[in-house]
Amino acid sequence: MPDDLYRSDILGWSKAQAERLRRLRRGELVNDLDWEHVIEEVEDVGNSQLSAVKSHLGLAMLHALKALAWPEHPAAEHWQQEIAVFLANAQDGFQPGMQQHVDPAELYARALKRLRKLPPIGGAPPRPLPEAVALTAAELRSEEFGATDLLDRIRSALPPA
């Protein structure tokens, strides 16, 4: 199989490789499998799914931080709705084996860093937010954990006023 097919027609390449793997499974001798790229692609599937889950969780946290930093802003209700959507999307793709690769503290720290890079929303500076929040990957994976839970958890980490 030409090496350039992987780069020029990934769909054609993937269909050809799938057919070769099927033939190999049936016991045929197959000498033209592109093992290097097949292995890469198999690894990439899992990494891509994990990345999507982390992205959804990070966006849920960012929107939660925005809603808490600017609670009077007209978009605050929309941000809260977005939290629910992002959490649900993350939970839909969150497989048990991913739990050990999801670090809620890291995701929260990134979301807080991103929030701090935003210009003041509505001309107002953000309200104080906690530097860290106690969350577990198992909680974030649970469909019982929703937008209100995430907002409450962040609020509970705020120092007393």
Image (spheres, grey):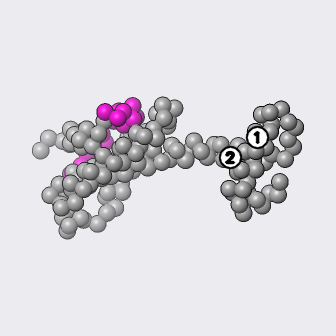
Give the magenta-colored segment's residue range.
126-144
- Find residue 144 and report its horizontal and vertical position in percent: 31, 33
Mark 1, other Cα within 10 Å: few <14 / some 14–19 / many ≥20: some
Mark 2, other Cα within 10 Å: few <14 / some 14–19 / many ≥20: few
Q: Is residue 137 magenta?
A: yes
- Find residue 88 and report its horizontal and vertical position in percent: 36, 43
CA gap between label 1 and label 2 equals 15 Å
Please identify the quarter of the rendering in which residue 113 is found.
bottom left
- By secondary structure, the bulk of the magenta-drawn segment is best described as loop
- Give left or right: position of 116 versus 27: left
Please identify the quarter of the rendering in which residue 131 is found.
top left
- Give left or right: position of 84 versus 29: left
Residue at horizontal 31 percent and vertical 42 percent from the top: 132
Where does label 1 land, which residue? 21
Q: From where the camera sits, is residue 69 visible?
A: no
Type of amino acid under label 1: Leu
Residue at horizontal 85 percent and vertical 41 percent from the top: 30
The reply to whether the C-beta atoms of the residues labelled 1 and 2 are less than 8 Å apart is no
- Find residue 148 and report its horizontal and vertical position in percent: 23, 41
User: Considering the numbered disc 1 on the image, is that residue within a helix, a strand or a loop?
Assistant: helix
Residue at horizontal 31 percent and vertical 58 percent from the top: 116
Locate the N terminus and report the quarter of the image it occupies: bottom right
Type of amino acid under label 2: Glu
Where does label 2 land, which residue? 40
